[in-house]
Image (tube, rainbow, N blue to C red):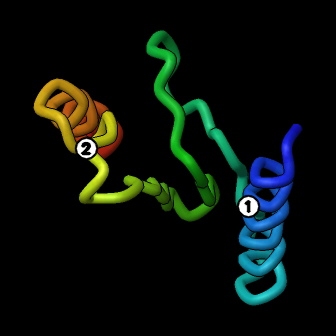
Amino acid sequence: MNKSQHIQQQAQDLFCRMVKATCGFSCIREYKFHPTRKWRFDYCIPERKIAIEVEGGAWIQGRHNRAEGFIGDMEKYNTAASM
């Protein structure tokens, strides 16, 4: 793990600890919510049915900003909402 990955890991862990400390709920990273698809939420508070997704930079043309990735995200979000 390089320094950048280590810092990102610490920030993610800090977020989950802050949710627990301030709200009293367990926050789970990379939560698999669908029984057959490989979909995961970046963060999830299952007991409250709260999903948190981090989309990334809008100006770097990452996967979430391209048409195919955007459509895939919409399918994931719509399926999650219907569940």
Screen quadrant of the N terminus:
top right
Mark in front: 1 vs 2: 2
Screen quadrant of the C terminus:
top left
- Does label 1 or label 2 sit earlier along the sequence? 1
Element type where label 1 sits in the image: helix
Give the image quarter of residue 75: top left
Outermost residue toward the bottom in this view: 22
- Residue identified by numbered label 2: 61
Q: Is residue 73 left or right of residue 12?
A: left
- From this view, report whether residue 26 is shown above or below residue 80: below
Q: Is residue 72 left or right of residue 19?
A: left
Q: Residues within 10 Å of mark 2 (few under 14, many from 20)?
A: few
Outermost residue toward the top in this view: 36
What's the residue at 72%, 51% (across, down)?
28
Give the image quarter of residue 76: top left
**Rendered image: mark on residue 12:** 1
Q: Is residue 21 left or right of residue 25?
A: right
Q: Amino acid at mark 2?
A: Gln
Decide which of 56, 42 is in the foreground and name it: 56
What's the residue at 27%, 36% (across, down)?
73
Residue 12 x/y as whole percent: 73, 61
Q: Gap in Å between the C-alphas at discs 1 and 2? A: 23 Å
Element type where label 2 sits in the image: loop
Residue 20 x/y as whole percent: 80, 75
Decide which of 44, 3 is in the foreground and name it: 3
Q: Are marks 1 and 2 in contact (CB under 8 Å)?
A: no
Q: Amino acid at mark 1?
A: Gln
What's the residue at 83%, 73% (across, down)?
17
